[in-house]
Image (cartoon, rainbow, N blue to C red):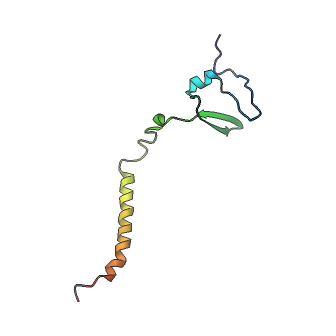
């Protein structure tokens, strides 16, 4: 009889603070072995979450920004830097009107 992953299970904690995540939970949440998990506190509980693979993260923020806004902003900043650098140089150039 297989246990539900919702049923609590007692696991040992070693002297080094190590424990084993039950196989059914590792399989359900795609935790590879060896692998890594996030461990943090939330609402007075210890939470263990799988670290997403690079494939799962691909495009995670797609659609959050309008297309081209970052590139446009970088161009604006570069243009402003260029104008700032050119300002002092213009004063040093000989005036052709004299």
- Residue at 38% x, 58% y is 74
In the depicted structure, whether residue 7 falls above or below residue 96: above
- Residue at 64% x, 17% y is 4
Image location (x, y in percent) of residue 39: 65, 37
- Residue at 22% x, 86% y is 97
**Residue 89 or residue 73, whichever sits in front:** 89
Farthest right residue?
A: 15
Left or right for 76, reference 13: left
Farthest top residue?
A: 1
Q: Quadrant of the N terminus?
A: top right
In the depicted structure, whether residue 93 falls above or below residue 37: below
Image location (x, y in percent) of residue 33: 59, 28
Left or right for 79, reference 96: right
Q: Quadrant of the C terminus?
A: bottom left
Image location (x, y in percent) of residue 86: 34, 74
How many numbered callouts? 0
- Give residue 46's quadrant in the image: top right
- Give residue 73's quadrant in the image: bottom left
- Give residue 50's quadrant in the image: top right
- Residue at 68% x, 39% y is 41
Image location (x, y in percent) of residue 95: 26, 85
């Amino acid at each position: 009889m297989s246990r539900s992953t919702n049923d609590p299970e007692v696991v040992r904690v070693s002297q080094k603070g190590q424990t084993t995540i039950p196989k059914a939970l590792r399989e359900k949440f795609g935790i590879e072995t060896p692998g890594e998990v996030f461990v943090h506190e939330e609402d007075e509980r210890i939470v263990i979450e799988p670290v997403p693979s690079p494939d799962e993260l691909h495009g995670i923020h797609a659609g959050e920004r309008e297309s081209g806004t970052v590139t446009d902003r970088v161009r604006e900043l570069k243009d402003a830097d260029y104008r700032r650098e050119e300002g002092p140089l213009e004063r040093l150039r000989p005036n052709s009107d004299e």
